[in-house]
Image (cartoon, rainbow, N blue to C red):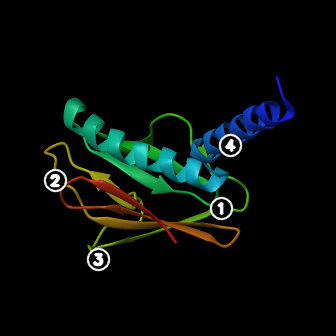
């Protein structure tokens, strides 16, 4: 084997390694992972309300959110609250409807009717918008 052949083989190996490295998917950031998890919660809560035949709500807290279920005596937590990463904040905009203070920000109706909502997750200069459309579709946009 000559030096030219060895150099050619090394060049091809290096080129192949570079291409493979560039095509590997990036790991999601903590903010992106939290937004994906929240979007999944929205999709699942909608399905769960329909399957259970009971209203399900999403209540925002200072550090995250929790699902609540309607019982005879009012809204009760379902499971443990979900905590967001320390620097992350969540806010929601929904259509203005009169609702008691004890009601959650978003209610998933067992008939499948969806209340459109716009959520914003912010942390470290990153803003991720999550839209819940009337069709039930959940759309994520990173800004």
Disc 1 versus disc 2: distance between alpha carbons? 29 Å
Q: Nearer the viewer, mark 1 or mark 2?
A: 1
Disc ID at residue 88: 1
Counting residues from the start of the chain, the first of labels 4 and 2 encountered is 4
Label 1 close to label 2 by CB (< 8 Å): no
| Cα–Cα span, label 3 and label 1 | 25 Å
Front tag of 3 and 1 = 1
Q: Marks 4/1: CA distance? A: 40 Å
Q: Residue furthest left?
A: 111
Q: Residue visible at 26% across and 53% down?
A: 137
Q: Which residue is mark 3?
A: 96
Camera-nearest label, 4 or 1: 4
Query: Gap in Å between the C-alphas at discs 4 and 2?
Result: 54 Å
Q: Residue at x 50, y 44 (%)?
A: 37
Q: Quadrant of residue 46?
A: top left
Q: Are marks 3 and 1 in contact (CB under 8 Å)?
A: no
Q: Which residue is mark 2?
A: 113
- Left/right of residue 136 with respect to residue 118 in the rendered view: left
Residue 15 is labelled as 4
């Amino acid at each position: 084997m000559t030096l030219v052949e060895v150099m050619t083989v090394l060049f091809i190996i290096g080129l192949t390694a570079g291409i493979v490295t560039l095509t590997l998917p990036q790991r999601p950031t903590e903010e992106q992972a939290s937004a994906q998890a929240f979007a999944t919660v929205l999709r699942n809560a909608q399905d769960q309300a329909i399957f259970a035949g009971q209203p399900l709500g999403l209540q925002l807290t200072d550090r995250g959110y929790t699902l609540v279920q309607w019982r005879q005596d009012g809204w009760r937590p379902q499971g443990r609250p979900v905590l967001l990463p320390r620097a992350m904040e969540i806010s929601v905009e929904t259509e203005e409807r009169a609702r008691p203070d004890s009601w959650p920000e978003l209610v998933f109706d067992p008939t499948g009717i969806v209340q459109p909502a716009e959520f914003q997750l912010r942390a470290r200069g990153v803003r991720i918008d999550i839209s819940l459309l009337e069709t039930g579709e959940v759309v994520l946009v990173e800004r």
